[in-house]
Image (cartoon, grey):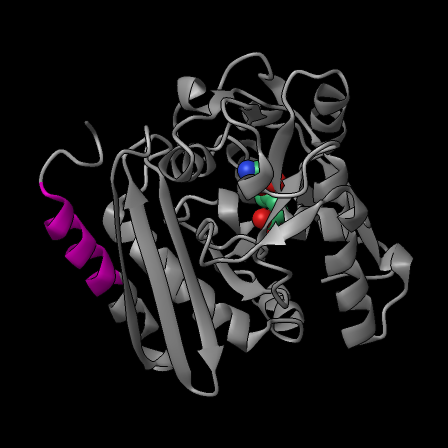
Amino acid sequence: MPTPTRPLRIGTRGSALALAQAHETRDRLMTAHGLPADAFEVVAIKTTGDRVLDRPLKEIGGKGLFTREIEDALMDGRIDIAVHSMKDMPTLQPNGLVIDCLLPREDVRDAFVSPHVASIAELPQGAVVGSSSLRRRAQLAHRRPDLQLVEFRGNVQTRLQKLADGVAVATFLAMAGLSRLNMRHVAQGSIAPEDMLPAVAQGAIGVERRAEDHDCAALLSAIHDGATGLRIAAERAFLKRLDGSCQTPIAGLADLEGDTLMLRGEILRPDGSEVVSGQRQGDARDGEAMGDDLARELLSRAGPGFLHA
Ligand SMILES: NCc1[nH]cc(CCC(=O)O)c1CC(=O)O
């Protein structure tokens, strides 16, 4: 809890997007509780994922590449809360930490980004596309096996520079990240979920705290978005059953209409040669069971070895 003598320390990664997300969290807390900006302090923390830029993420391996150091700081009391892209979060939090505060979700779609080409359909035969996301690579390879995929890591500016340098003719980014950076204009367009199902929890920000920190729990409950919470719970239950390692292309999206939740999910072979997809619809309160059940269905239809072949 912020006091006149000690501001509430908000931990996050140091990237422009992470800082924008931390500031959004701070602004929502200020508004909800009538607190001044100096009741908060944003603390930037470097993670392994930020440090190692010369290798594909799947090679560095391990879960929580972008989160471990931040969770350590939270457990040690060096920060009071941590702001995360839920897309990057492992499905289980370490003992003693909880995420029960989700901010209202941004645009869930992927953006098609290219200086020269308007859409996936208009990419010339054999064009070079940059992406380090296993999901996006597999989805694209499935739809356009002719395209050539190259690894593309780094922050948004780095990736745009690579496009300007001609390393690739197009890439993909989350619309949510571009929106939060006021950079939607760099996208040629957004891709409908029917054409490219987003990553589980894409566009959602979660705020993590120590489980026993009841002051922070009370502070955060005022900015929790219930609808986002229900959607993310269903999507992450789906992911958890699949035990989405970083090696597995998985996509999932839940939508809410009133009390009805619709969940779509898919798993792919990394080379895009096969996709298994399905959906569930039901009462939003059963979202986690739906996610688990859909994952079981996809696993059994895919057969043994699909995810790790
Ligand atoms: N894996 C990196 C990452 N984690 C969250 C976002 C974007 C913001 C979001 O999805 O909430 C991104 C970058 C991207 O996919 O373009």
Q: Is residue 185 above or below residue 167?
A: below
Per the picture, the main secondary structure of the magenta-coloured stretch is: helix
User: 289 and 129: which one is in front?
Assistant: 129
Residue 55 located left or right of residue 279: right
> Start and end of the magenta stretch?
292-303
User: 63 and 156: which one is in front?
Assistant: 156
Q: Is residue 62 above or below residue 13?
A: above
Which residue appears farthest toward the bottom when viewing the image?
A: 258
Give residue 244's position: percent from left, percent from top: 32, 41
298 in magenta: yes
Which residue appears farthest toward the top when viewing the image?
A: 54
Give residue 217's position: percent from left, percent from top: 58, 67
299 in magenta: yes
Point 43% across, 51% down: residue: 96
Residue 293 located left or right of residue 283: left
Ligand 1 shown in quarter: top right
> Residue 77, can we see it?
no
Give residue 149's position: percent from left, percent from top: 49, 22
Residue 199 located left or right of residue 222: left
